[in-house]
Image (spheres, rainbow, N blue to C red):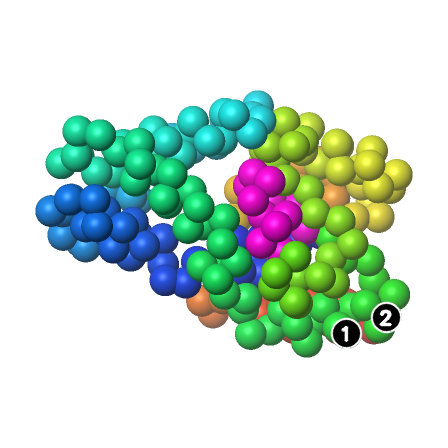
Amino acid sequence: MFDAVGTLIYPDPPAAVAYHQLGRAFGSQLTQDTVSQNFRLVLKQHAYEPRTNENIERERWRRIVANVFTDLDDTETLFHQLWEHFANAMSWAVYDDVLGVFAQLESRGVAIAIGSNFDDRLIAIAERLPPLRFARQIFVSSKLECTKPSVDFFRSIEGTLRLSPEQLLMVGDDLQNDFGGARSAGWHSLWLDRASSTNAVDCIRTLGDIIPRFA
């Protein structure tokens, strides 16, 4: 089981850059630095709640857009443009190591799935990014109606796959949501930290570091 954003894919251009570019088109005078700072702060203020669904996710992002663009009175149309921007697979790039690793895992009979704090846009995005087609199933929090690191997120996936916790491995870049959440649910887990200099057993620097574990 792989996380999506930050593990398999990343926004291209970066999210804050896309916000700034589209914001300017709708009259925002905020600088790129200000938009970037606001975006980081507002994301923390509107973190994922344990329970969610499609409507909750859409409203959460609507609030995020409104709070990032402090110089705009009406951000509704801008919100819709940003929502559609990040629904477009062309706005995302796949990390270079994904295709090769997925091909090797499949050749070894390892079933690949994706589990992400995302909404149903991810399913359409994955269909248009060829490396992600290796994933047999895609689980998004808005459909499961619970988010990582809640144990409910992992239990719901177990039920669908009809697998026990010890049969499942979670790989992701978020130490709390992916690594910690999976461990709390009894799964195996690996923390992907591409900038890491540590040799910790449960930390990997690239997805390729997974392969020897399936030798």
Badge 2 amino acid: Arg
Left or right: where does residue 18 sit relative to residue 108?
A: left
119 falls in the magenta region: yes
Q: Secondary structure at mark 1?
A: helix
What residue do we see at 11% from left, 47% from top?
Answer: 29
Residue occupied by mark 1: 104
Residue 18 shows in the view: yes
Instruction: Say few, some or many: other residues with alpha carbon within 10 Å of mark 2 (under 14 / 14 to 19 / 20 or more).
Output: few
What residue do we see at 66% from left, 72% from top?
Answer: 99
Q: Secondary structure at mark 2?
A: loop
113 falls in the magenta region: no
Left or right: where does residue 198 sit relative to residue 140?
A: left
Magenta stretch: give its range: 114-126
Residue 36 shows in the view: no
- Residue 31: give x, y in percent of width and height: 14, 52
Q: Are marks 1 and 2 in contact (CB under 8 Å)?
A: yes
Residue occupied by mark 2: 108
Q: Compared with residue 96, is residue 170 higher up or lower down, i.e. above or below?
A: above
Where is the C terminus found, in terms of image quarters?
bottom right
Instruction: Say few, some or many: other residues with alpha carbon within 10 Å of mark 1 (under 14 / 14 to 19 / 20 or more).
Output: some
- Residue 86: give x, y in percent of width and height: 45, 50
What residue do we see at 58% from left, 54% from top?
Answer: 125
- Residue 101: give x, y in percent of width and height: 69, 72
